[in-house]
Image: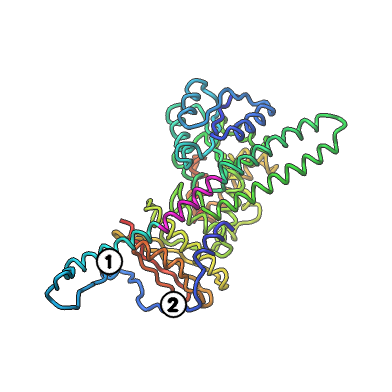
Amino acid sequence: MRVVVADDVMLTRQGIVHLLTSAGIEVVAEAQDAQGLLHEVRQARPDVALVDIRMPPSHTDEGLVAAQAIRNELPQVGVLVLSEYVEPSYAMRLLREQPERVGYLLKERVFDIATVVDALRRITDGETVIDPTIVSRLVGRRRRNDPIADLSEREREVLGLIAEGMSNRAIAARLFVTERTVEAHVTQIFQKLRLPESADQHRRVLAVLAFLRT
Amino acid sequence: MGNVTWTRLAAKSSSQPSNPDAPLPPSCAAAARLRWSLTRQPCLTWSGPSAPLSGWPSNERLQAETLAHLDQLRASRVRIVETGDAERRQLERDLHDGAQQRLLALSYDLRLARAQAQSDDDASSTTSLLTEATGEAQAALSELRTLAHGIYPAILGEAGLAPAVYSLADTTAIPVEIRSMAEGRYPTAVETAAYILVAEGLDNAARRDASHVTVDIVQDGGWLMVMVEDDGSDRTSDLIQLADRVGALDGRLVVESTRLRAALRCA
């Protein structure tokens, strides 16, 4: 797999590149800001661009803006945004703006390189990837009259995996059950939470995240 | 929790609880009255001789000077608050770009070194040392992140008030219901004041054993109205620093036993 890495801090960028390379990922170019990233992505046409959310000049949401620019211009290139903080708002913004072939992971995931490689593969397969920490924070949020309390333990587990962006097939493989069982769980969950069920997987992720947030 | 530093700042207060003498009106008609009462300027008149004495400044001139002086004072109050906030933000950035990045890089190196040691046959002690060191580096990184977030919550400056308030609600130990939320961007000082008010409201509700908190943030014309209400026991602090901050913005804060309300001028 070919990736471009963008991070304005050289030490961090080098660390990420080393870890990716050691895991057999081919880093075809590096960039230190959004402009450089767009340039490199146009030149190298990677499978995925790995982008730090905070880059010059304003160090705020350049990574998200760049993700949108890349996905608009080169829809075949996926984008994995890395963020230092657990911020569900950013993940949801990313999904709202570009629901396909995008991911949002915490930067420290890079230490667990297998997770990153898995995320990169899922993105190239057209899936969405949302960091499990963000999902568990949203699922664990305290609510009054909590409808999530009505879910069984297994249903709660499935809800979390849906929010992480997994397809029914991937959830089935993860939980060692059939896809049909997962489908039944999904129907139950959406009924209990009074959410409209959607065949579109990305819309499904966004609907679940939006539900968890309120 | 991330908001500790902010709330401590807001909660430093005198011992007297405040009297909710003038509640903020809920309706639009009442909001118009409120606007008037909030924007009313102090009226200063010269009560001395009606004709200016020779060598004395005229009544008009005195009045103009006094008003100009008041404007200067108000401006300096705003500057003090804004400078403090800007410094916090810079400090957070320095931590993020400096110490946090170095620790991150150190963690990457340790991780690589460990992978290499693992591939050697005779290096189990090295591997365990490196595993320990990696854990330490990540713990330090996580602590530093929490500290930086407490100094200035990056999400507030980056994404605005709504995401920052949702984030606060996510991490509060009691259920928080956000009933209404103004989604736009507002002047930095307004967003910061509103954020601190909510952070303080949530923190304080938890300390007063509340089981539920509601948050309302709505824009009404040129005003951002912020309300945090809980079902806890009576409040015992009156949030002088928060009142100062709101006052510097020409806004108004009403502190009641289980409710905090503010009107902040946002346009």
Q: Position of residue B63 (x, y in %)?
A: 21, 68
Q: Which residue occupies 17% across, 69% down?
A: B55
**Residue type marked 2:** Ser
- Distance (Cα) linking label 2 and label 1: 22 Å
Task: Give yes or no for contact between labels 2 and 1 (Cβ–Cβ under 8 Å).
Answer: no
From the image, give the main secondary structure of the stretch colored magenta: helix
Q: Position of residue A99 (x, y in %)?
A: 48, 38
Question: Is residue A185 something that shows in the picture?
Answer: no
Q: Does mark 1 fall on the same chain as mark 2?
A: yes
Q: Give the residues drawn in magenta, as a range.
A: B80-94
Q: Which residue is mark 2?
A: B18
**Residue B118 left/right relative to B179:** right
Q: Which residue is mark 1?
A: B39
Instruction: In the displayed orientation, state which residue is furthest to the right.
Output: B122
Q: Position of residue B129 (x, y in %)?
A: 80, 41
Query: Image quarter for residue A97?
Result: top left
Is A28 placed above or below A190 here? above
Using a 10 Å C-alpha cutoff, classify the residue at mark 2 as few (fewer than 14 neighbours), some (14 to 19) or many (20 or more): some
| Quadrant of the drawing holding the N terminus of chain B | bottom right
| Quadrant of the drawing holding the C terminus of chain B | bottom left
Q: Nearer the viewer, residue A181 or A14?
A: A14
Q: Nearer the viewer, residue A139 or B131?
A: B131
